[in-house]
Image (cartoon, helix red, strand yellow):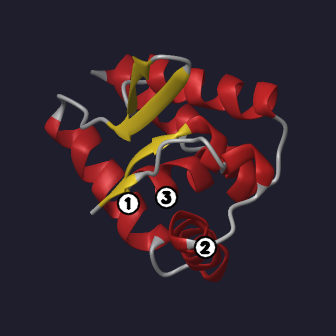
Amino acid sequence: MQTDLVTLFQALGDPTRLRLLNLLAAGEICVCYFIDVLDDPQPKISRHLAYLRRAGLASARRDGKWMHYSLARPSSPAAARVLDATLDELANDKQMQRDRAQLERACCAVRLPAPLVNAPKPQLR
């Protein structure tokens, strides 16, 4: 149990991973949207998503050349409560609200940025 909580808190200890979790709380998202919203290079985003997967906070599925990520619930009730409290707090943060708004704009834009033109739209809740 202690190792699980240490891993969880380490995963939550990075601003990029918190921003990714905030976006994952909105639904299943293709990695290209993370790149667009966070304005970070693909290797950095992928590295942080892999970290979240190892910590059990994200899951991935491949659809052709596209990788889709979604939020994963920790099996530990204590870890799940920590994640829920973190996500609740992130929802009140101005930067996180801007990220969510930018994701929604990118999903619904009439003219998508070039990297998103052929990308599958996120499955937002």
Label 1 element class: loop
| Left-right relation of 77 to 10 | left
- Earlier residue among tags 2 and 1: 1
Residue under the point 63% across and 83% down: 94
Q: Nearer the viewer, residue 32 or 117?
A: 117
Crowding near pointer 1: few (<14 within 10 Å), some, many (20+)? Answer: some
Identify the residue position indicated by label 3 in the image. 22
Question: Which of labels 2 and 1 is toward the front?
Answer: 2
Residue type indicated by callout 1: Ala
Q: Answer with the quarter of the image where residue 55 lies.
A: top left
| Left-right relation of 11 to 115 | left
Locate the C terminus by quadrant: bottom left
Q: Nearer the viewer, residue 86 or 64?
A: 64
Crowding near pointer 3: few (<14 within 10 Å), some, many (20+)? Answer: many
Residue under the point 64% across and 78% down: 98
- Label pair 3/1, CB-CB below 8 angstroms: yes
Q: Does residue 53 sit above or below 84 in this rendering?
A: above
Residue 40 position in % (x across, y down): 83, 45
C-alpha gap between disc 2 and disc 1: 21 Å
| Left-right relation of 85 to 103 | left
Identify the residue position indicated by label 2 in the image. 110
Residue under the point 34% across and 50% down: 83
C-alpha gap between disc 2 and disc 3: 24 Å
Crowding near pointer 2: few (<14 within 10 Å), some, many (20+)? Answer: few
Residue type indicated by callout 3: Asn
